Amino acid sequence: MWNFIWEQLLEKLLGWLFGGSTAEKGGDKTEVVGSSQRSPYFQLLEKNKSAKESGNYKNAVSYALEAIPHFKEVEDKEDIQVIWPIVEVSKFLPMFREGKAELERVKEIVKSNPDFGENWVREIAHAIDVAEILHKIIEFLRENPGFPQSDLWKEFDVDGRKWAPRMESAEKVGVIKRERDGEIKLYAKGKVSLRQ
């Protein structure tokens, strides 16, 4: 009996932590659980998290790309757990050599899936713009190694508050190197390929 009670408590706790619930939708049950046993979509989420924790952003982005076709609207929710692959590809895909082309492909998938709202099409379009600007920034940093990050915003006429986190993401992926010497100085390392 105690085992049953503990199992029920554990299930409720996991449901609370990972948004676990099942919703009736058109007669079908749609799983909204972080359990890797219940949905390939959330299995890929767990793989994505593990890859990022180990610093392997190439695999993390690959898992996000693999998950996008599995997306289904869940109880009209658009929380981070439900739309995680769009968030991931928007954040990290611009850093990769094939990023812009992959984002164009993702944009078509998102446009053709009615479960994605128009705001996610705009999000991908914005990520494509980021990929284009990032390419120019890397070329600029190749010619100007050690360029101060605070001056980069004026050079490219972008909002530093929005671009500072992108520079952190670019560093995580291995596209740039940031050194702090009183101020943050940037060095280009070159775009990383998803295909290597």
Image: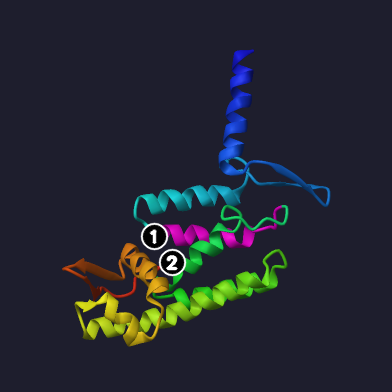
x and y, in percent, of residue 15 in the image: 61, 37
Q: Residue at x 24, y 82 (%)?
A: 142
Q: What element carries label 1?
A: helix
Between 33 and 183, which is closer to the camera in this rendering? Answer: 183
**Relative image position of residue 114 (x, y in whole percent):** 72, 67
Label 2 CA crowd tier, 10 Å (few <14, some 14–19, many 20+): many
Label 1 and label 2: CA atoms lie apart by: 8 Å
Image coloring type: rainbow
- Looking at the image, the residue that sits furthest to the right is 27
- Quadrant of residue 59 in the image? bottom left
- The amino acid type found where label 1 is placed reads Tyr
Q: Do the residues labelled 1 and 2 touch (CB within 8 Å)?
A: yes
Q: Which of marks 1 and 2 is nearer the N terminus?
A: 1
Q: Which residues are the magenta region? A: 57-74
- Say which mark, if any, is on residue 92: 2
Tell me the residue that label 1 is attached to.
Answer: 57
Q: In this view, does 192 lie to the left or right of 13?
A: left
**Does residue 101 show up?**
no
The prevailing secondary structure element of the residues shown in magenta is helix
Question: Left or right: 60 with respect to 11?
Answer: left
Instruction: Return the x and y of residue 11 as percentages of the image width and height.
Output: 61, 31
